[in-house]
Image (cartoon, grey):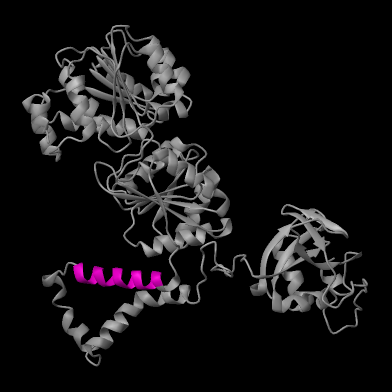
Amino acid sequence: MKSFETLGLSRGLVESVLQIGFEIPTPIQEKAIPVLLQGSRDFVGLAQTGTGKTAAFGLPLLELVDDTIRDTQALVLAPTRELGLQIASDLENFTERFKKFNIVAVYGGSSISEQIRKIKKGAQIVVATPGRLIDLIDRKAINLSAIRYVVLDEADEMLNMGFKEDLDKILSFTPDTKSTWLFSATMPREVKAIMKNYMTDPFELTVGEKNAGNVNIEHLYVMVQERDKYLALKRILDYTPEIFGLIFCRTRIDTQKIAEMLMKDGYNADSLHGDLTQQQRDRVMIKFRQRSLQILVATDVAARGIDVEDITHVIHMNMPDEMEFYTHRSGRTARAGKKGISIAMVTRHELGRVKQIEKTLKAPFKRMMVPTGPEVCQKQLLALMHKVHEVKVNEDEIATFLPAVYDALKDLTKPELIKRFASIEFNRFLEYYRNAPDLNQEGASRRAEGGDERSVNGSRFFINLGKMDGLDKSKILELIDETSGVSKRYIGQIELKGAYSFFEVEKEKANDIVSGFDGLEYQGRQVRVELTERRTSGSSGGRVRDSGGSRERRGDYGGGRSQGRQRSSGSSDKPYKKKWR
């Protein structure tokens, strides 16, 4: 196995790398560095995120750039501010015992005048996001005529983010004699177009199979119903108390909503999305990098380029539309040779997407069952005991307080003390997860924690009331409770349509529904409630068409339909017509 000393790097550069803690080059570094050190050929490197690409191009770049010349000789383009800052920081660290360079990072959301000032002082290397670099070019604040090397890092991400025209414009201002180094995790046709238009006979290097995922990532999926995803997420977080992870959502709204729900439920979480100001983004990322934030909920675009060490888990609340997005998401974990876990939360209908990604990445997905309540409680209890075992005791400062503590606990035996101490933390999980349902999609009957809608193994009813009558799910539940005495704990899925709706009820409560709605009027309309069955073949009689296909309307259990009698105001029951006017 090769070392950095054998790759052709200068002694000072090798010493800087060893000082950082890099001892053995990764495969992309081992194969790319000797080629790039020649400095005379275009280069294309295809490797997954987290495999050490920054050092693969950064070390040769520092070796080749002349620190005695003040002109800008190297340009590194990155898709996001976060990645650009990370690259600039890594390059500076690489030069600790080497040459002294002026490395300037330029990006949006920060003072452009300050960035212009730094460039004019003489920046041999500029690390830039495409949008801000275009601004500098338009202001004639940067001169790219002396560029010898252009690095396109995460090229596929830049193109996915819509930077193709910006890249074309930027590259048009650079000399034809430059060397272009392109690094990408995937190779879509847009990247191939850049190779064709701006590169000459590039040296192509692929580390790992094309479209293959990082072998250090364990790919898992849980199968739950859409409405149970947040509850399943909480189970997974509670079952993994030491998690340091990223949660991906498809939209900004979902990202903010999930983050707020997690914070409300006591988790150490925050969000990262495009609606945040640059100052807010910086604050969130600083907290996450310092690990004072345990969970970061992000959109695909906002999280691009995040390079944070030791992320243990990536959780996908929704499967992304593009396979490349899944690759970049999961690539936030298992970086620099470490292991990580990627968990996709899918419904039964999304399982085909999992199989498609599995086939493309050539990486097996294993099904993970959502932990049960007892499993979560046990895991939390063991985590607490681990903390107790590993806690650092400040002997000197606590000594003066211990006599009073010993006296207060003197009537407790050691086993009693352990049980009571463990119960302080354990009781809240035990209370929350007592009688917790099975959230895995095959589960027959489940009640969502917090009283959310559930799926029941029972009877499905049609009702001729819907959104046009001003009803929502909460009012449907109240209507059922007031008329039939069937509480929401027996009610399953509710489907609201325009002029009618469907709802599920436990079988033993079906007769109560029929008798309860018999003779009811609502806002002058006769209310009709009928049992429905899914038909697998053609049938006679009237049908109600809904989103699930054809459903035949059937009579009630009494053998006859409601006659539409209005309840009298003198009845002992509530005058429903009056209540629901």
Residue 382 in the magenta stretch? The answer is: yes
Q: In the picture provided, is 173 more to the left or to the right than 33?
A: right
What residue is shown at x 53% (from left), y 68% (from top)? 449
How many discs mark residues in the rendered view? 0
Closer-to-camera residue (56/383): 56
Would you identify the image quadrant in which residue 130 lies?
Answer: top left
Asked if residue 189 can be seen in this view, the reply is: yes
Residue drawn 75% across and 62% down?
502
In the image, is 358 to the left or to the right of 409? right
Which secondary structure dominates the residues rendered in magenta?
helix
| 347 is higher (above) or lower (below) than 521 | above
Q: Quadrant of the N terminus?
A: top left
Q: Give percent across and percent down for residue 489.
A: 64, 74
Q: Residue 62: x, y in percent?
A: 18, 22
Residue 466 seen from this side: no
Position of 544 relative to 567 (above/below) = above
User: Which residue is more in the foreground, 123 or 320?
Assistant: 320
Q: Residue 136 is drawn in which quadrant? A: top left
The stretch in magenta equals: 375-390
**Looking at the picture, how far across and down is residue 208, in whole percent?**
30, 34
- Please determine whether, in this image, residue 411 is positioned above or below residue 185: below
Please, which residue is most extreme toward the left here? 11
